[in-house]
Each structure stands twice: as structure tokens, then as C-alpha cells.
Amino acid sequence: MSLHVGAAPGDIAETVLLPGDPRRAEWAAERFLTNPRRVNDLRGMSGLTGSWQDTPVTIHGSGMGMPSLAIYATELIRDHGARTLIRVGSCGGMQAGLGLNDVILAMTASSTNSPSSSLFREMQFAPCADWPLLRAAVRAAESRGITPHVGGIHSTDSFYDERPDLTEQLRRHRTLAVEMETAELYTIAARHGVRALSILTVSDNLVTGAAMPPADREQGLSAMFDIALAAAFAG
Ligand code: HPA
């Protein structure tokens, strides 16, 4: 048991999928895992462990934003032995050509600030996805008839953004999408020498104004969990 993850020793699998929303963790565990059991409920943050094709998998909420994700990712790796962490989440498309429900695999993530910023001081660290995991996710998506967009995204601290100028510069530099967790996930994974990847679906598009009602998000979620599990165990 660690401060925010109340799991007993051995309760957390080496492979952890991280949706932001604890309810989604519960939903996905019921849908994708065999015999899921609750391993965390501290502060209402759900973590469940079950098996996928006879291999243990944990699905654990990360909460919203990098400070929340940093707490869970650090404890899951450092105190509970997680070795592969895959974020499964939504994002706002920053290029006009991105449609709702499109799948994005984040190769890297820009940020203006993150919990690790103070560690790097003047350094602008470039967080990057684990390459074999990214390659496996591309293959898993393509084999399911999905062509993923692969490239850089932006991890912001402010959902309600007051910097349209910054959004425009990121867009000009071909940033695919904005979300709130990946830059820190990749940085923490690098620090601990474990694998990480973010698989995202476009829930809204900042350029076109298209937006998906929350009730319609299930389809994209299923595809992401499916790709994440196939990629995690692709050998
Ligand atoms: N901004 C930040 N995070 C998000 C967005 C957004 O527009 N959409 C989904 N996650």
C-alpha cells in the first residue's frame, strides 16, 4: 500500500491502463478483463485488476491533469511494480483534418509546465513514447481497420485556455491535439525506465468546433482499450 494506491503487495499488474476517469476504469475492467477485482478506492480513485488472455492487467484512473497523474504513475511504478503504462483518453484536435473519434498515438508531448519542470530547470526535456509500444499500437490499430494519427501533442495545465496565441503556434507546428497528462506520464516513465504510451481519441476539435456528446464516447473508448491491450502484449 502506498499513500494514494491502497493496493496490497502483488495487487497491481505490471501492465497498467490509465483512463482519466475512475468510472471509465470500472467500465473497462468489466468489459475487457476476466474476474476484475477492486484494488484501489482511496479518494474514490478506482483501480481494478483482472486478467486479459490469462495475463494480469490493472486498469486504474489517473484523474485529470499532470499533478494527479504524476502521483498515481509514480506510486504504481515505484511502489507497486508497474512496468508498462498506457494512458487511454480523449483529446481536443488541433488540426482541421482530424475527425471526431479519430485515434491519435502521441509520439511526444509539449508542455509549458509540468510537475517535472522544476527538476529540469532551464532544460526543455523532450518526453517521448516507448518506441516498441508505439509501433505495436500502430500495427494493432491498422489490423483493426483504424489508421491512427501519429505525432506530437500538447499537454496543458488549463482546460479553459486563455492563450489562443499559444494554441495557434502549436497548431502551426503541426501539433495534433491537446490533452492534460501525457508529457508528465512520458517523463516519469523515462525516469523509472519503464514503458509508456498515450492512446487518445478526438472528443472535440478546436479548429472546426466539432464536439462529441459525452454519451457518444463509448465507441472510441472500446477501440482504444482494444488497441492498448494488443500493443501491451505484442511481444
Ligand atoms: N483541452 C484539453 N484537454 C482536452 C480537450 C481540450 O480541448 N479535449 C479533451 N481533453
Image (cartoon, rainbow, N blue to C red):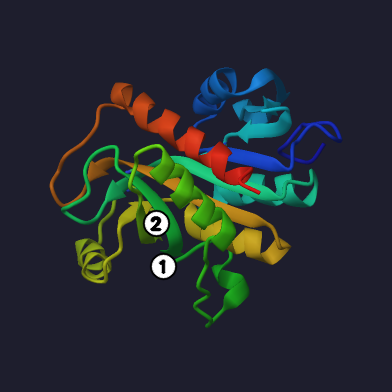
Residue farthest to the right? 9
- What's under tag 1, amino acid-wise? Thr
Label 2 environment density (alpha carbons within 10 Å; few <14, some 14–19, many ≥20): many
In the image, taking residue 46 as reference, residue 215 lies left or right, namely left
Task: Return the residue nearer the eye: 94 or 15.
Answer: 15
Question: Which residue lies at the image location 45% right of the left edge and 46% below the top edge?
Answer: 199
CB atoms of marks 1 and 2 within 8 Å: yes
Residue 13 drawn at (x, y percent)? 74, 37
Visible residue check, residue 62: no
The image quadrant of residue 130 is bottom right
Q: How many marks?
A: 2
Question: Which residue lies at the image location 24% right of the left edge and 32% below the top edge?
Answer: 212
Residue 193 lies, with reference to residue 222, above or below; the image says: below
Residue 41 drawn at (x, y percent)? 67, 25
Of helix, strand and loop, which one carries label 1? loop
Residue farthest to the left? 208
In the image, taking residue 120 as reference, residue 200 lies left or right, namely left
Label 1 environment density (alpha carbons within 10 Å; few <14, some 14–19, many ≥20): few
In the image, taking residue 51 as reference, residue 18 lies left or right, namely left
Mark 2 Cβ inside 8 Å of ligand 1 = yes
Q: Mark 1 points at which residue?
A: 112
Pick whichever of labels 1 and 2 is earlier in the sequence. 1
- What's under tag 2, amino acid-wise? Thr
Question: Which residue lies at the image location 67% right of the left edge and 28% below the top edge?
Answer: 53
Q: Mark 2 points at which residue?
A: 156
Of helix, strand and loop, which one carries label 2? loop
Residue 106 drawn at (x, y percent)? 43, 56
Task: Return the residue nearer the eye: 1 or 171.
Answer: 171
Question: Which residue lies at the image location 79% right of the left edge and 46% below the top edge?
Answer: 81
